[in-house]
Image: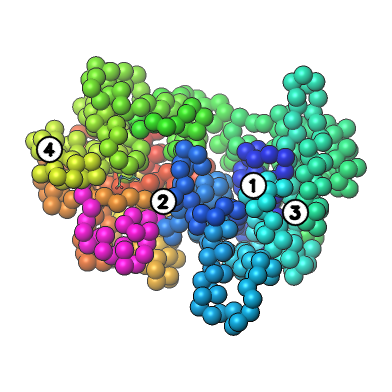
Amino acid sequence: MPKYIVVAGGVMSGVGKGVTTASIGKIIQEHGYKVTAIKIDPYINYDAGTLRPTEHGEVWVTDDGGEIDQDLGTYERFLNLDIPKRNNITTGQVYKTVIDKERQGEYLGQTVQFIPHIPDEIKRRIKDASNDFDFVLVEVGGTIGDYENIPFLFALKSLEREIGKQNLSYVLVTYLPIPSHIEEMKTKPTQQAIRLLSEHGIFPDFIICRAKKSLDVVRKKKIETYANIISEHVISEPDIETVYQIPLDLEKEKLGDKLLKEFGMKSKKQPNWAEWKKLVENILNPKKTVKVAIVGKYIDIGDYNLADSYISINQALMHAGASLNAGVEINWLDSKMFENNKKKLTELKEYNGIIVPGGFGASGVEGKINTINYARINKIPYLGLCYGLQLAVVEFARNVCSLKDAHTTEVSPKTNAPVIDVQPAQREILEKNMYGGTMRLGAYAAILKDKSKVLKLYEETGRLKEDEKRIQELMKDKSQAFRLGILEKNKKTVLERHRHRYEVNPKYVDLLEKRGMVFSGYYMRGDKTRLMEYIELSKNEFFIGTQSHPEFKSRLGNPSPLFYGFVKNCNK
Ligand code: GLN
């Protein structure tokens, strides 16, 4: 039976419960155990697909096509795992299942009630995601004291009773403020959070104290007295420069050994943090720093939410940089300023590389196309992500293939050169199979072209081998096999995640190829239509676009091949 570590948050939100959960997972992993993590989101939305990214951060996409809260991304980045969508449990999913079951008569005439049916469904989902793991981290979203948390805390208490306290441990992550007018660290809000949790019959086994600084002995003792928890289980987690330092800091307080001891267990292997430490050191003190411009549509995004809306791109650049011992300075440029003012484009000269990220709609599109044109002509390393590939195709069609009206039908539905278009059959297939309506969502297999730059990067980073293994795993599941497409024998095949509707129009592929655009990978749909997944230009040292979102598969110590290649070229 797996052991459970439940992580809940006290005092306030936004103190880093997700990264703490991921860090605990990383630590347990490093001690030799198989770990997974579950995120509970107490909102009614079924998933994060319809949430506004500017409010809630980026939508994370899983291999199996889930649109999820970004915490799952944090877990994947720390644990180097592909986590399925069932590891995200929302109130909406729980209620929907219970109501659907009731409608189908599965409760055989019982009165369906909050207790026991809702907690039972929560427990079923938790157990379902726990198979085959030694340890399961369960992060309860929100803050203790929120009304929405109650069913989940009830369910976890009930799980504890079922499996025995020896198999489940509670970690409370709190925040200790240091008000500027007294310059003293206050423990009172933490004491209150402990009391709120105890109202649910839950007493924390560990308290992780987020604060500007480490806790002193006096504060630890105070919490010990109040919460009846030995001060060795009161762990400091002070502010740091990069989140990847957190597992190292928590291990300084021997959290791994202490947690295992709580379960009556010992390390299976001596943790070896050398590689992780080196990567963290590279993030903190890189040998050289490259400057990257990310040119997108940033309306409605205040200064504060920008990084969160594109957190995976940020992280992917950081991971690539860490592996190459290069820092990456990111500048977010609004593409609108390149729309009517071509002179402004020369400002792009100061960057070592340019990215056009994913996006939807018409706003700022001409600015992005002008940017891509500038990068292509001036041979500035360019990486196009999803919309960034599509608009690179539009730019090339207009300026190299003389298709003046070339466009995506997303912006110009009546264009007479629809180089990017929705594929009608695609829409049908997707709708029939209910994969998120018309979106191509989740992991799709791409067959890579021999000798292409893209293939070389997947080989160089070891991802090709990894993906071949992963494909075998996914093929065991029928619905996944459908998504993956037709796999050809003896071909080099890789996996990336997708979230888009439009495709390179197969009718224009020949023409584009003739004029020098290399299609370095394609996805083979069930009806044998090839959908283009990668483009590259041989005249430019690094000009690569992908229809996918490779940023979702980037992890510290295992960077995404395209980001790795991009940063490497920026660093030349
Ligand atoms: N808007 C484009 C599409 O739907 C690109 C989407 C994206 O960049 N994620 O195909």
Q: Using a 10 Å C-alpha cutoff, classify the residue at mark 1 as few (fewer than 14 neighbours), some (14 to 19) or many (20 or more).
A: many
Residue 74 position in % (x across, y down): 55, 46
55 part of magenta stretch: no
Q: Of the residues shown, which amino acid type is indicated by label 4?
A: Asp
Quote the CA–CA distance across marks 1 and 2.
36 Å
| Among the two numbered marks 3 and 2 on one chain, the one whose residue lies closer to the N terminus | 3
Q: CA distance from mark 3 to mark 1?
A: 16 Å
Label pair 4/2, CB-CB below 8 angstroms: no
Q: Amino acid at mark 1?
A: Gly
In this figure, which residue is indicated by the disc labeled 4?
405
The residue singled out by tag 2 in the image is 463
Q: Residues within 10 Å of mark 2 (few under 14, many from 20)?
A: some
Work out whether mark 4 precedes mark 2 in sequence or the reverse, and give the earlier one. 4
Secondary structure beneath label 2: helix
Q: Quadrant of ligand 1?
A: top left
Name the image quarter holding residue 105.
Answer: bottom right
Residue type beneath disc 3: Tyr
Dot 4 alpha-carbon crowd within 10 angstroms: few under 14, some 14 to 19, many 20 or more: some
Q: Nearer the viewer, mark 1 or mark 2?
A: 1
Chain part drawn in magenta: 420-444
